[in-house]
Image (cartoon, grey):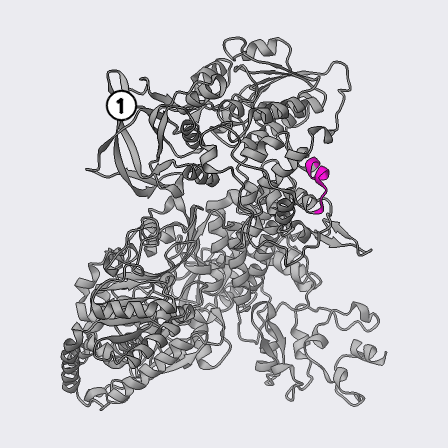
Amino acid sequence: MRKLITLDELIGFRERVASAGGEEAETPTLVVCAGTGGQASGSNDILRIIKRQILEQNLGDKIELRITGCQGFCEMDPFILVEPQLHLYPRLKMSDVSKVIKAAIGGYVEEDLIYKEPQIGISFHSQNDIPFFKKQTRTILGNNQMLDPIRIFNYVERSGYAALEKVLSRAEPDWIIEEVKASGLRGRGGAGFPTGKKWELARASGDGQGQKYVVCNCDEGDPGAYMDRSLLEGNPHAIIEGMLIAGIAIGATQGIIYVRSEYPLAIKHTMIALRQARELGLLGEDILGTGIDFDIEIVRGAGAFVCGEETALIRSVEGFMGEPRQRPPYPIAKGIDGCPTCINNVETLANIPVIINRGAVEYAKVGTPGNTGTKIFSLVGKIRNTGLVEVPLGMSIGEVVHDIGGGPPGKARIKAVQTGGPSGGCIPAHRFDLPVDFDSLKEAGSIMGSGGMIVMDEDTCMVDVAKYFMAFLRDESCGKCFTCRKGTQRMHELLEDIAEGRGTLDHLDLLEELAVVVKDTSMCGLGQSAANPVLSTLRYFRHEYERHIIDKRCDAFVCKDLVGPPCQSACPVGTEAWRYVAYIGRGEYEEAYRVIREANPFPSVCARACDHQCEERCRAGTSGGDPIAIRALKRFVTDRIDPSTYAPVREEWKDGEPPRVAVVGAGPAGLSAAHILSLKGYRVTVYEAEPEPGGMLYCAIPEYRLPREVITKEIQSLLDDNIEVTCNASLGTDFTVDSLLEDGYSAVLLALGAHKSRPLGLENEDVEGVYPSIDFLKAFNQRGEQLAKGRVGVIGGGNSAIDAARTALRQRDVESVAILYRRTQLEMPAFDEEIEAALQEGITIETLISPTAIKTTSGLFSHLELVRNSLGAPDSSGRRRPVAIEGSEHVIELDTLIVAISEDSGVDCITPAREGGIEVTDWNTVKADPNTLVTSRPEVFAAGDVITGPNTIIDAIADGKKAAAMIDLQIRGEELVQPAKSIEPLLYVEATEVDADETLDHRIETPRASIDWRKRNFAEVEVGLSMQEARAEAGRCLRCDLEFCEKDQSEARVAGGHKK
Amino acid sequence: MINLKINGIDVAVEQGTTLLEAAEFLGLPIPTLCHMEGLTPYGACRLCVVEVGKAPASRLVTSCTYPAEEGLEIRTSSARVVRARKIIVELLLASCPQSKTIQDIAAAMDVRQQRFRQEQEDCILCGRCVRMCSEQMMAGAIGFTGRGQDRAIGTPFDAHSEVCRLCGGCIYVCPACELRCTYTDPEQAICGGCANIGPPCVEKPQFDDMMCYMQPCVACEIKED
């Protein structure tokens, strides 16, 4: 490269390079991202293959290759982008590359490999249409795609150094500062100080004679932030140009790029860029004959987060240990070696050429007043589209997270977003309408910081997050100020205590007090913002802290000491699943039965119909494999062992006549409560409105899932001399709350359930052919009536809908069954295995569809008017709201319509409850204290679905057991409090040795009857496991309980040894 | 002369006076630990913080390092300042309870308990010894090493110092160890001096003709065993 001597030579050079580039615009170009992230994902292999193919097949004039720095679409790495059509081929395997090259040369799209939006399945042929890119404004980051960072010609071709040209062609540099001020640019490193003002002060500082410095701060220490790395790796010349302009504006002749050692690629590319710029004559002495001197050197950090702080950075550049000092004096006045120093962030400097080229007025049009321009964020964590995004300031967090980020990758809902790294705070999901800008985030208790945005979902524990950041800050504190050094250490200690179950409410107060003082008294930004993770999580997620302290629970299942074995922790009744699985592995089936039955009065029922929350948390599953088939193993045991094996401990009431308790409702909640109360010696009368006990088990759950004999046998084993069940007796009609209490019952338990289907609220809902799902199921289960005929439509997506659909399919005169659900299949609340079984049986599921009108012909239901939906913004439940698509109205003909959208307790139950002085809600449930289950009347308790609305069997059982305990405490005159117990194994079960060759590497498949056979009858669909299968599946268990057992002095293992 | 307002009292001081000096001139008590007459102010212990400025932009700064500015308004004992100082004292007691200096400060501020996990450290990293060695004794044998939790006082690379003249100045100014070496009760020795830097008596086998200003020093006792 020949050195340019004058400004005119630069102008000419730029013109020549720009026009040369134009000739090659038609050749297809393969663009491959080879930033640090891209290389880690395997782009080097892709590049090798491309290069080899180009050489071997002489494709040099048919195709171009451009290797770029980080482009920000990191989730899709390694990808190839084909220009000029902008076809994006994501997540390529080495074997796919030749297909892409062929498609690029041939000018067509390789459909198998082109980008497809996961949830909708639509492919996007142009990068600009892909939702991730559509809403971004890639002013700065977009350039990374267009150029190879180690070729200065690429930069010049894309108007590189045009801003420098503009600056050098005008004599007095004051206008630069005015332009930057007018643009409203604020520092992108975190503090948001107006850049124009900083430059103005820097210019005025000093005596005009001495050295001044321009420093580019690339010490990006925030965990999860890599925007500056990508800029320096991908477009170092933009930074060089920005620094040149800064130097000219403030009168500095020396620039320093302070880059952390952990960025070797950025350092390499910057060194190459500097060398090229010097060769071209753009850096050095007497640049282009203007008499201006400016050169840049690189100073590498040595692994300290604190060196991102201005004054510590200066000390580090001077060669000392990075330690901040008090300000004033500010670096502008006294910086490196006492000279005025202007420190700017990488992204701030990258904005400078844009401002100079476009003009401040144009630049200020993007963003909002006071927060102009764009900002690059690193969107990481529990998000579908991980990567770097550049958006105009002022866009809402929700748009960034959902529209650009693509929302959560799985079913867990997004809970919060941490902005600003460890110095920032979390913003909860209900505040996602906040605009992303300096001021709004500050008001919400966070900061924008350098742009890290970590997305957190329900499986993230906020206490753990605060603890993690505090550990980071404690390790990175320089240690000079007592309060920062000791404060971060002590805050981490307190958080550790809380996370490990030793926390008290006093600790929370102490934590807050300490946090405030650390914030107030620390000298530098690290200490002053160290308290932010604690303060912001306390502000928005205090309930999580309180759960850890008061209830000794971590609802996100993260804090190991509070979770114990996850299967036991997840079970609402605390079944020791690990224990009975261990016994099955050892062949001790009777022991296993006792373990199951101890916690759960309905083992055979649950073995068939439970939603197995234990399996969702099984560590075999959450660590990347398959969860243990716990429910199937439970069924294996309950199928074999007679209930009489379990002999519960029975108490006799001590003083005189045992008190009597009335239980209204013989469902799982009511019967569990009755059983527990009877064991404690009470006399219990259970009133049931239906002809048979069992509640929803009998009325709603179909026979092919839960045979009638199983229910009957189970209930029989629970009933004893203390319990009397009276059927066909309804609340309000045959007795009232008052009449029960007058009758001498010491307490009343309302376990009425949620057994009334909710109506759609459309006209004609009561005509023949349209049935609420519970009525439809009851008609069949209780009376054998087969109401479904012909083409059946079921509206809803929960278990009730699937039950109705599969029951209808088995009825005599039915031709077809379709389920119509308003959201997508991923959001259906029904159990996955039920949906799977339904699809296997030939039931179709239509998603994103809602009914608008029910139409009749001659008084009979004949067709349904529908509209199609798209998913809009999330509603209060965190799920995306269905929004009707205009013009998509259509009609389908049906013979039967079953409405299964939801259930509640119905006015028939709620009215008498209300009349009995019990407070109820507007949505037909009973109000009860969540801790004591007492209603508004002190002697009346409630349990199960009547409080929560439709819920699972095991939750009802748990409520029933809890209500029994509370009733017992109340009758004995004690406080209604159950002390919190942390979940941990209370005994040690020896681990079975498993042969590595015999261990299955995947979960046993749910054994089901063949599809053709089961569609024609109501026989049980699921088949039990064989002994061999059960032993093999039990052998897969990771025995998470053993973590909590330690060897005692005699080298024998005991449980609970680990708690110190 | 620069005009300030401290606790509502107007005072005029010379250029270069710190807020601490100005407050002391007025007789207002401000607790300090790392500050010492004759040594440059360091600002490590944070005890001397005062509130400057007007709400809502007021902030706490260390008075020992902050130079007087024209028109500044300072409050030396506002609620915010007192709350901060009390927590700082609790943190000090939680780390270094045996120091009489720290105990006296705690008593003066009416702090009777500390709520953190108790540690027994013998150094609060106030830096007095470092500054004494470098500024008054012109030796510079010891300095800060490490970062954060690992921060400690030591010689470069923990090697034996060639420039230490064994003056004992470091031990003299240390607020954490108050008593002179208790040679009668070496188990109770709380002096951090021997632990922080190696006086010759601990290292060199012959120390008869060494200059030792402590007499006799617990190191002699330990060495003889």
Q: Residue A364 placed where, x, y %?
A: 21, 61
Q: Residue A497 placed where, x, y %?
A: 62, 52
Q: Residue A776 placed where, x, y %?
A: 42, 22
Q: Is residue A333 visible?
A: yes
Name which residue type carries label 1: Ser
Secondary structure beneath dot 1 equals strand
* Front position in the image: A294 or A726: A726
Q: Which residue: 27% across, 62% down?
A: A110
Q: Is residue A143 visible?
A: no
Residue A593 magenta: yes
Q: Which residue is mark 1?
A: A862
Vertical order, A510 against A527 (above or below): above
Q: Which residue: 63% across, 32% down?
A: A600
Tell me the quarter of the picture where residue A969 sits.
Answer: top right
Q: Is residue A119 left or right of residue A1046?
A: left
**Which subunit holds the residue at mark 1?**
A
Residue B152 magenta: no
Q: Residue B211 placed where, x, y %?
A: 75, 87
Q: Which residues are magenta?
A: A586-594
- Using a 10 Å C-alpha cutoff, classify the residue at mark 1 as few (fewer than 14 neighbours), some (14 to 19) or many (20 or more): some
Q: Main secondary structure of the magenta part?
A: helix
Q: Which residue: 29% across, 30% down?
A: A851
Vertical order, A752 against A51 (above or below): above
> Where the N terminus of chain A falls, by quadrant?
bottom left
Q: Is residue A19 left or right of residue B182?
A: left
* Front position in the image: B122 or A776: A776
* Front position in the image: B152 or A35: A35
Q: Is residue A114 left or right of residue A442?
A: left
